[in-house]
């Protein structure tokens, strides 16, 4: 009997077979993803923006939750790798008639799917799929519930490395609705794995999960203290769709206390970069003068996401057959 691999996303060779979460990815593997992405940046600047690495492979985008950036950049990434890309329209699919997630996966696998890119409101859905798939098929998590958004964390690392170089000396503040954010959870694991020495979580107590300090994250409930001398600020929107009950007084009061304005940004380092995974709610967590200002790297994050997703798709597709099944 074969033992299941410790991490269901790595095969027995330690290769990335599925991408389910940042947890369990060793630092050298994360570095390899970022280096692989480096090689794909130039593809986007060429007249012919494609390489033949995934020619003949079929990538299925299954977005059971809405998305602008992640879905589109996965589609661009797969097309730049010359894959055949299929975007299942979930609202018009037989999911609406009650077909289960795994029956949907089985039917698309019967259509010779090679890679599934999945966003789902239920945390753990990509794990369920990974355990169910035939060994030659891969799944990439494009965001599952509050749990994880690993490619967002990887593109955030890529952005930070691009602007700041080494991770270790940085002070990074993640600000906002950390409790309900899969981006925050994945960013925290990613930044700690890469050795960031000063990682802070900033927000109202009602939006801060327990257990952060045990991980080595400093917790702040006042914005100015939380971003003081920060090199990097990651702003998060209020994830109203995942809040159970009213935890906040009003958007206006939230902006007064936690909205990143030019004045508040003055507490960070003069060369601080401001990031946001999107979608932004201007006037709630961030002021337009900051979102569109000289410290903002929010749109470069989106562009880097293409190369990072090309790296992930190409790496899972080139991994050996999983031996943990
Ligand atoms: N960052 C992010 O996940 O954005 P979308 O919801 O638009 O994909």
Image (cartoon, rainbow, N blue to C red):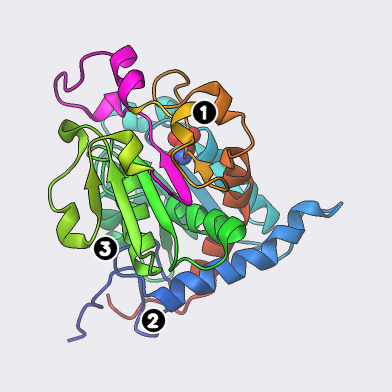
- Determine the image quadrant of residue 176: top left
Which mark is in front, 3 or 2?
A: 2
> Residue 94: horizontal and vertical position, in percent?
36, 31
Q: Position of residue 103 (x, y in %)?
A: 30, 46
Element at badge 2?
loop
Asked if the stretch drawn in magenta spans residue 246, the answer is: yes
Viewer-proximal residue, 276 or 92? Answer: 276
Q: Is residue 304 above or below residue 132?
A: above
| Residue numbers of the magenta segment | 228-257
Whether the residue under disc 2 has CB within 8 Å of ligand 1: no
> Which disc, if any, is residue 195?
none
- The residue labelled by disc 2 is 14
Query: CA separation, marks 1 and 3?
Result: 47 Å
x 61%, y 64%: residue: 37
x%, y% of residue 41? 70, 59
What residue sits right under mark 3 in the picture?
Answer: 131
Q: Where's the C terminus, which quadrant?
A: bottom left
């Amino acid at each position: 009997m074969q033992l299941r691999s410790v991490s269901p996303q790595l095969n027995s060779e330690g290769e990335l077979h599925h991408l389910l979460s940042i947890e369990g990815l060793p630092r050298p593997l994360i570095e390899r993803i970022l280096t692989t992405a480096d090689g794909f940046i130039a593809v986007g600047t060429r007249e012919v923006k494609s390489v033949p690495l995934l020619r003949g492979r079929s990538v299925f985008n299954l977005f059971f939750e809405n998305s602008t950036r992640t879905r589109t950049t996965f589609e661009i990434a797969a097309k730049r790798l010359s894959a055949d890309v299929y975007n299942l329209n979930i609202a018009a699919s037989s999911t609406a008639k009650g077909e289960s997630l795994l029956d949907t996966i089985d039917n698309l696998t019967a259509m010779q799917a090679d890679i599934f890119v999945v966003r789902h409101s239920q945390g753990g859905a990509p794990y369920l799929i990974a355990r169910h798939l035939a060994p030659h098929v891969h799944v990439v998590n494009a965001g599952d519930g509050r749990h994880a958004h690993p490619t967002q964390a990887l593109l955030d690392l890529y952005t930070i490395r691009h602007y700041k170089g080494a991770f270790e000396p940085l002070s990074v503040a993640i600000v906002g609705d950390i409790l309900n954010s899969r981006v925050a959870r994945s960013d925290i694991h990613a930044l700690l794995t890469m050795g960031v020495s000063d990682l802070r979580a900033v927000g109202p107590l009602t939006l801060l999960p327990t257990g952060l300090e045990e991980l080595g994250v400093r917790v702040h409930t006042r914005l100015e203290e939380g971003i003081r001398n920060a090199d990097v600020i990651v702003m998060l929107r209020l994830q109203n769709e995942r809040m159970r009950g009213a935890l906040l007084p009003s958007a206006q009061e939230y902006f007064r206390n936690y909205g990143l304005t030019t004045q508040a940004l003055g507490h960070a380092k003069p060369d601080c970069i401001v990031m946001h995974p999107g979608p932004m709610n201007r006037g709630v967590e961030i002021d337009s003068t900051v979102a569109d200002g000289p410290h903002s790297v929010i749109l470069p994050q989106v562009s880097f996401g293409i190369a990072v997703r090309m790296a992930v798709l190409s790496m899972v597709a080139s991994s050996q057959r999983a031996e943990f099944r």
